[in-house]
């Protein structure tokens, strides 16, 4: 308690928060793998293609939206103590 500042003591997190963080981490790793896959497909178009271009776009957009949602949720839960 220097200069009138109070020291905040954080309470332990609920185990489900830790699980949510691990899921978000896994999704972010999948995003990284998807970026590597997109770069590889750009150089070798015959390698690793999905059934259709529309399916590829839908899969990547769904992955990015889920990553954004999970990271936002984890950040929101970290601010609520």
Image (cartoon, helix red, strand yellow):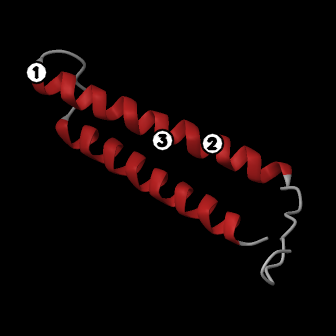
Contact (CB < 8 A) between labels 1 and 2?
no
Q: Residue at x 25, y 19 (%)?
A: 48
User: Label 3, on which residue?
Assistant: 28
Q: Residues within 10 Å of mark 3 (few under 14, many from 20)?
A: some
Lower position in the chain sequence, tag 1 or tag 2: 2
Q: For the view shown, which residue lies furthest in the bottom direction?
A: 4
Q: Residue at x 88, y 56 (%)?
A: 12
Label 2 SS: helix
Vertically, is 43 above or below 61? above
Picture layout, residue 55 above or below residue 38: below
Whole-percent x and y of residue 47?
A: 19, 15
Q: Residues within 10 Å of mark 1 (few under 14, many from 20)?
A: few
Where is residue 44, by image quadrant?
top left
Element marked by disc 1? helix
Which numbered disc, 3 or 2, marks the residue that appears first in the sequence? Answer: 2
Question: What separation in Å lies between label 3 and label 2 (alpha carbons)?
Answer: 9 Å
Name the residue beneath numbered marker 1: 43
Horizontally, is 25 left or right of 20 in the view?
left
């Amino acid at each position: 308690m220097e200069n009138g500042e109070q020291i905040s003591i954080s309470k332990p997190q609920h185990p489900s928060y830790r699980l949510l963080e691990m899921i978000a981490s896994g999704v972010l790793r999948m995003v990284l793998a998807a970026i590597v896959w997109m770069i590889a497909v750009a150089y070798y178009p015959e390698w690793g293609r999905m059934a259709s271009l529309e399916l590829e776009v839908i899969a990547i957009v769904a992955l990015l939206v889920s990553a954004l949602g999970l990271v936002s949720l984890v950040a929101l839960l970290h601010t609520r103590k």
